[in-house]
């Protein structure tokens, strides 16, 4: 773990900043509308109680009944009733829209934070965990605004308004009720949050474990059965479910206790107010209708505090989610978006870099030290060397997947084509649009023709709308590689990074893919748009695509030669034949 653990305030600061900075006006508007909704409800009940009591008293006296104005209070009641309904709708609309906007921004920030060095490696190592961060962890943060900030603001305004209103009846009554509301309402919420913190975190951990173990059981049931571990995995799943059920029971018990505590505090305050106002009525300071108004105001003043219970119960879960996400959010704020390459000369410039592959200390793999490599725009460079020479590490550094420890790295905007074809369970069109979101159908078909896949896709009933399965299921290995190649053709970038792009393909398919790559490069060169390539390979057919060969051994460059030189042909002869 890097550095010290952040405090609870610091953990939430990056999340609260999204509300306070980028959506400040909407956040305050939502909180204000929520407060007005609560106040209008309190005023409605208080005025209704006063009106009913005053009407009943007026009805006992004929002269008073004729003099009593029933129109203004009744109009006020109808206005407050309709206003409260409209405010409640506006509150839900504004607060939920603000929350969804903030969470959407947060997901974008997290994507940027994770789209850094070693991101792909971490994603492959822990795909379910990172998906959990983007779904459950972010969803847990809706409590920050909806169930903590907004209810706390509304409850505070309700307590202050109640205290001020009662102060017009009796100053000490208003002060006492206001302090009791703030002390008991916020105090119970804080106590519940403290007690529920560990329980909510334990439940959250068990939920994550339950999801992971369920996936392991379903996806790996064949392997588990072969090794006799199927029943053991089922037992682990049941234990996680049982522990989560225990946490749910504890939270439900705590919620019941908090509800009882709020009820007791409310009843105690109501009884105190009843005795106080009764004494004032007996002394002739106030009338019975005013006493009824005071009692009903106090009765409704505890309602907004009870809304804090849900946020208090989920506080531990919210803090845990914030702790997991805060560092990434802060890193993404400091991240610089990838832009156009500034140099007019080099597509790749590495100066005296040093870097270790992931797990080098444990495996003893070679590391790069004081390595320099310059590739000009339009150059075609093959990177060769035996397994463990450092090719993959160097490619990862150039691709931005591995940070360097020393030196300077400057790389043009690029696209990466590897032997692992990354396709999604979506249509052919949407898989292509990842590379060029604004491309029209004519451009997509042109890329498919360039990759030699247009006839295959045209023969399907759906054409570009043909659905692919997970990982490109429905296409052969060669067809999937051609689709990835078409996607690369759509990317208007000055640099291609090719990491053994034809590995695993048969001789005919591999030769066709390389021929189409060469044809595309030649067309661009004749059009004056020279694209540079860096291809890591140990196969002769792929290295023939290059005009320059760089050989690595034990993390250093030991040879750098160009086509036409004797060393170039000699290095080609050392590579594996087709």
Image: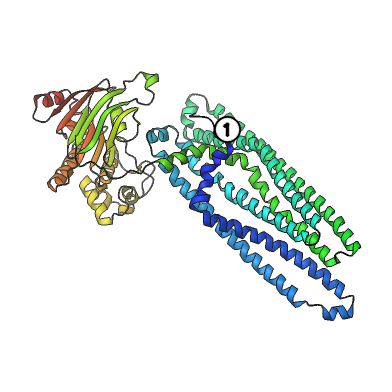
Q: In this figure, what is the number of numbered marks?
A: 1
Q: Which of 533 and 499 is in front in this view?
A: 533
Q: Measured from the top left, where is residue 228 in percent x and y? A: 51, 24
Q: Measured from the top left, where is residue 494 in percent x and y? A: 23, 43
Q: Which colour scheme is used?
A: rainbow
Q: Measured from the top left, where is residue 17 in percent x and y? A: 51, 47
Tag 1 residue: 237
> Is residue 270 found left or right of 328 in the rendered image?
right
> Is residue 408 found left or right of 361 in the rendered image?
left
Quadrant position of residue 561: top left
Q: Measured from the top left, where is residue 244 in percent x and y? A: 63, 36
Q: Can residue 321 be seen in this view?
A: no
| Residue at left offset 25%, top offset 29% | 351
Q: Residue furthest top?
A: 364
Quadrant position of residue 198: top right
> Is residue 234 found left or right of 393 in the rendered image?
right
Q: Which of 277 and 459 is in front in this view?
A: 277
Q: Which secondary structure, mark 1?
A: helix
């Amino acid at each position: 773990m890097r550095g010290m653990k952040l405090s609870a305030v610091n953990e939430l600061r990056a999340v609260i900043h999204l509300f306070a900075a980028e959506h400040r006006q909407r956040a305050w508007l939502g909180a204000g509308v929520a407060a007005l909704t609560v106040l209008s409800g309190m005023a409605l009940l208080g005025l209704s109680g006063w009106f009913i009591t005053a009407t009943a008293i007026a009805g006992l006296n004929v002269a008073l009944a004729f003099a009593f104005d029933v129109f203004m209070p009744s109009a006020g009641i109808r206005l407050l009733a309709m206003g409260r309904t409209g405010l409640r709708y506006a509150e839900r609309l504004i607060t939920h829209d603000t929350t969804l906007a903030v969470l959407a921004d947060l997901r974008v920030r997290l994507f940027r934070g994770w789209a850094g060095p070693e991101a792909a490696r971490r994603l492959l190592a822990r795909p379910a965990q990172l998906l959990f961060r983007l779904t459950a962890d972010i969803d847990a943060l809706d409590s920050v605004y909806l169930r903590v900030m907004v209810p706390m603001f509304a409850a505070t305004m309700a307590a202050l308004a109640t205290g001020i209103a009662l102060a017009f009846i009796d100053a000490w009554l208003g002060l006492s009720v206001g302090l009791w509301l703030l002390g008991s309402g916020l105090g119970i919420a804080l106590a519940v949050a403290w007690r529920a913190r560990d329980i909510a975190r334990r439940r959250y951990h068990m939920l994550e474990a339950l999801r992971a173990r369920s996936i392991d059981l379903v996806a790996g049931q064949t392997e588990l059965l072969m090794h006799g571990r199927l029943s053991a995995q089922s037992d682990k799943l049941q234990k996680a479910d049982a522990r989560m059920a225990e946490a749910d029971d504890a939270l439900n018990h705590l919620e019941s206790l908090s509800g009882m505590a709020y009820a007791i505090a409310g009843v105690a305050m109501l009884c105190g107010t009843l005795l106080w106002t009764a004494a004032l009525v007996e002394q002739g300071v106030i009338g019975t209708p005013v006493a009824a108004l005071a009692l009903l105001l106090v009765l409704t003043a505890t309602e907004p505090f009870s809304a804090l219970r849900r946020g208090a119960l989920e506080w531990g879960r919210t803090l845990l989610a914030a702790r997991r996400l805060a560092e990434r959010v802060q890193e993404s704020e400091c991240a610089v978006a990838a832009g156009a390459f500034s140099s007019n000369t080099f597509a790749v410039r590495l100066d005296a870099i040093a870097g270790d592959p992931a797990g080098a200390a444990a495996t003893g793999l070679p590391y790069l030290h004081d390595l320099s490599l310059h590739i000009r725009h339009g150059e075609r460079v093959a990177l060769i060397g035996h397994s463990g020479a450092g090719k993959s590490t160097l490619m990862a550094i150039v691709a931005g997947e591995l940070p360097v420890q020393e030196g300077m790295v400057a790389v043009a905007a690029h696209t990466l084509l590897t032997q692992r074809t990354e396709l999604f369970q979506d249509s052919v069109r949407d898989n292509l649009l990842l590379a060029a979101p604004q491309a029209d159908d004519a451009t997509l078909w042109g890329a498919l023709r360039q990759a030699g896949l247009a006839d295959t896709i045209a023969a399907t009933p759906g054409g570009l709308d043909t659905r692919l399965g997970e990982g490109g299921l429905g296409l052969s290995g060669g067809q999937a590689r051609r689709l990835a190649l078409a996607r690369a053709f759509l990317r208007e970038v000055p640099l291609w990074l090719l990491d053994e792009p034809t590995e695993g393909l048969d001789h005919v398919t591999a030769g066709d893919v390389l021929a189409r790559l060469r044809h595309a490069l030649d067309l661009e060169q004749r059009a004056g748009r020279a694209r540079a390539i860096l291809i890591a390979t140990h196969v002769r057919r792929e290295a023939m695509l290059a005009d320059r060969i760089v050989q690595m051994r034990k993390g250093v460059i030991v040879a750098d030669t160009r086509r036409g030189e004797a060393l170039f042909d000699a290095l080609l002869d050392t590579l594996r034949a087709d």
